[in-house]
Amino acid sequence: MTVAVIDNRALPLWWLLPLWVVICLNIWSLGKGAQAVVDMPETAAPDVIASTQTVPWTFFHNVFDFPLVEREEIVVPAVPGHRALRVKVPKAGHDPWNVLVHTNTAKPIQRGDRIEGRVWLRLDRATQGQDTGRATLKLQNARSPYTSMQVLHLILTPQWQEFTVTGIAPHDFKAGEANLVVYLAGQAQTVDVGPATLYNRGLPQP
């Protein structure tokens, strides 16, 4: 059997053998690379759906319970962004949510998504005779009736702490329809509220 002719002379099949070896090696190498890409594990970072370093905390106080609440921004090297909001609560509120801060989601959430909120907090000054403070951390619907996804009751100390709350979205939320809230009116105290971030970690993996 002949496969090529040079100067009218037939060349045997073995003359093309080195070329076939090179072609087969290239095909094998491409296939191996494609398999490596398919087998790589997913390492996608969670989606940031709110951050007080981008949009600052929203502050609220019930004027019937607290006509005036002092607050100021302070520089804090110990936390990300180096900024915090110092809130002076003069007494225990009729309800703990009568002084609060919150940050709303900037992106939509799907039912079943795993939501994680993180916030830095510390006690600056407590009621006389106490050395700890109180706060409540919530993931919730941002509209009435403010249904909770998860609630944590926190003990604050003079040391900065990063608190984490997690929950599962019970239904779809449009951007701005869910939020992270910190209640501060559980007692008379001065609290430093550091940065917060909300993450959407998506649906649970099967």
Image: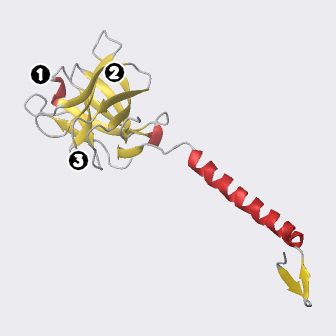
Q: Secondary structure at mark 1?
A: loop
Q: CA distance from mark 1 to mark 3?
A: 28 Å
Q: Secondary structure at mark 2?
A: strand
Count residues near mark 2 (Cα–Cα under 10 Å), then give few for <14, some for 14-19, many for 20+. Answer: some
Q: Between residue 172 and residue 142, name the one nearer to us.
A: 172
Front: mark 2 or 1:
1
Front: mark 1 or 3:
3
Q: Quadrant of residue 155?
A: top left
Instruction: Answer with mark 2 or mark 1, whichever residue precedes in sequence.
Output: 1
The quarter of the picture where the C terminus appears is top left
Farthest residue, direction front:
1
In the image, what residue occupies the spot 23% across and 47% down? 176
Q: Secondary structure at mark 3?
A: loop
Q: Examine the rendered structure and indicate whether residue 159 appears above or below residue 146.
A: above
Residue 43 drawn at (x, y percent): 52, 43
User: Which residue type does callout 3 highlight?
Assistant: Gly
Q: CA distance from mark 3 to mark 2?
A: 33 Å
Q: Between residue 13 and residue 111, name the one nearer to us.
A: 13
Q: Which residue is mark 1?
A: 94
User: Which residue type does callout 2 highlight?
Assistant: Arg
In the image, what residue occupies the spot 76% across and 66% down? 23
Q: Quadrant of residue 70?
A: top left
Q: Between residue 165 and residue 28, name the one nearer to us.
A: 28
Question: Does residue 183 show up?
Answer: no
Residue 135 drawn at (x, y percent): 28, 23
Q: Which residue is mark 2?
A: 125
Q: Quadrant of residue 60?
A: top left
Task: Give left or right: position of 39 versus 88.
Answer: right
Q: Which mark is residue 176?
A: 3
Q: Examine the rendered structure and indicate whether residue 121 appears above or below residue 60.
A: above
